[in-house]
Image: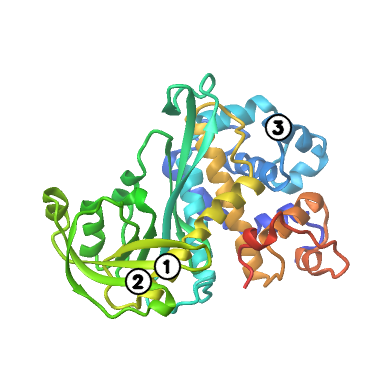
């Protein structure tokens, strides 16, 4: 089936073109377009991500140096930098955002039965956090952050069972993380793991009202009264397990019901942690274990910043920046889908590296990735950056 197809085309064949067209039609992306459609724009941007191009000029140069192959890649004629740049600046970034979210839904279905967590839970387990991507204030004047600094913020809700991001929101660096909680539809019986930056009792109570659970860390000045103390397994590191009510006037109005406060000693790192949750059924050690898994979202941020092009941008407007980030997320998800559908033993990093040097090869991808004579690629600090290795 793949005989005579470039590796790039074989990878893209895992994408439903009709799904992309529906996104284009919704935002009228191809209106008044003659030759360079939104699909061709996506192919060019995806090529740049897969081959680790450094700039838009670099991407266009590599494409045009293989101009005879562009037709079979779906791009058609040679592409100019001006055409691609104008498309990134003017075509609605929501086309690529909706398309990427559709790919994410497919990936979550594929990885639905897999779990990296040691604790078996009925509902999903999510980590919510954000990462800052620094920009030059003189160039990206719209990306307000500080007086002398510009930045965009990538807010992510990561499914901890399979390392698939299921909610992504891009803002300027100045927007507070708490605002993202207003955009999330909380799943019943789901667990939401957050650091203390998301401690807003009105929003936490909304999670409780949705029938979901949260695990976070309170500030040291939290005012509360103890209602009950449960027996503690101090040998396991549990120093106290309390049922509490908030004392302060406004917090108690915003969160009028009981909370669970757990004090845990982490022997491995020699530090004491305090957790706040609305779940009274799990063991205290399991709550601590859930919060420990929040570190996966930090690894996710580190991974995409190292292996995808989202730290240096190929356009200056907000639309171009968001288009590039969503295209990178789409590529990340496509590679994850390919890995799962072909049951590849390689990590995402290894798959991307092999793709980057064989993008114009015509070897069937199942043969390409399973060739025992392939060089073994290694991540930097492999123990931390491995994703999707089950």
Is there any visible trace of residue 78 in the rendered image? Answer: no
Name the residue beneath numbered marker 2: 239
- Tell me the tag on residue 139: none
Name the residue beneath numbered marker 1: 265
Q: Is residue 39 above or below residue 383?
A: above
* Side of 216 relative to 28 (left or right): left
Residue under the point 34% across and 63% down: 275
The percent position of residue 158, horizontal first and vertical second, equals 46, 58
State which tag comes first along the sequence, 3 or 2.
3
The alpha-carbon separation of the residues under discs 3 and 2 comes to 64 Å
Residue under the point 69% across and 41% down: 48
Q: Nearer the viewer, residue 192 or 95?
A: 192
The alpha-carbon separation of the residues under discs 2 and 1 comes to 7 Å
Q: Is residue 142 above or below residue 309?
A: above
The percent position of residue 282, horizontal first and vertical second, equals 33, 77
Q: Nearer the viewer, mark 3 or mark 2?
A: 2
Q: Nearer the viewer, residue 230 or 331?
A: 230
- Quadrant location of the N terminus? bottom right
The percent position of residue 117, horizontal first and vertical second, equals 50, 73
State which tag comes first along the sequence, 2 or 1.
2
């Amino acid at each position: 089936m793949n005989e005579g197809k470039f590796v790039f085309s074989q990878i893209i064949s895992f994408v439903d073109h009709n799904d992309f067209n529906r996104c284009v039609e919704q935002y009228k992306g191809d209106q008044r377009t003659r030759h360079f459609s939104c699909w061709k724009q996506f192919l060019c941007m995806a090529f740049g991500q897969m081959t680790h191009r450094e700039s838009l000029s670099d991407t266009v140069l590599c494409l045009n140096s293989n101009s005879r192959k562009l037709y079979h890649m779906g791009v058609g004629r040679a592409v100019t930098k001006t055409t691609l740049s104008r498309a990134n600046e003017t075509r609605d970034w929501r086309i690529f955002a909706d398309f990427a979210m559709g790919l994410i839904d497919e990936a979550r279905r594929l990885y639905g039965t897999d779990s990296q967590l040691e604790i078996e839970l009925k509902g999903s387990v999510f980590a919510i956090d954000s990462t800052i991507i620094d920009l030059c204030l003189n160039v990206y004047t719209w990306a307000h952050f500080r007086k002398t600094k510009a930045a965009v913020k990538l807010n992510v809700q990561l499914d901890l069972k399979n390392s698939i991001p299921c909610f992504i929101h891009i803002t300027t660096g100045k927007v507070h993380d708490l605002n993202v909680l207003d955009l999330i539809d909380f799943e019943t019986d789901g667990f939401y793991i957050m650091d203390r930056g998301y401690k807003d009792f009105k929003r936490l109570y909304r999670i409780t009202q949705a029938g979901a659970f949260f695990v976070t860390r309170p500030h040291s000045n939290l005012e509360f009264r103890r209602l009950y103390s449960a027996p503690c397994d101090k040998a396991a590191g549990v120093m106290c397990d309390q049922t509490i009510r908030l004392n302060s006037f406004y917090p108690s109005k915003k969160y009028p019901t009981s909370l669970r406060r757990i004090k845990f000693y982490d022997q491995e790192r020699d530090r004491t942690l305090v957790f706040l949750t609305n779940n009274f059924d799990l063991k205290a050690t399991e709550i601590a274990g859930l919060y420990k898994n929040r570190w996966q979202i930090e690894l996710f941020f580190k991974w995409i910043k190292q292996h995808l092009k989202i730290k240096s941008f190929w356009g200056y407007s907000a639309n171009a920046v968001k288009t590039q980030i969503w295209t990178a997320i789409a590529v990340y998800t496509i590679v994850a889908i390919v890995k799962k559908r072909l049951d590849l033993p390689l990590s995402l990093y290894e798959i991307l590296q092999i793709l980057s040097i064989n993008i114009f090869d015509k070897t069937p991808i199942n043969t390409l990735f399973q060739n025992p004579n392939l060089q073994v690629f290694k991540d930097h600090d492999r123990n931390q950056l491995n994703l999707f290795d089950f």
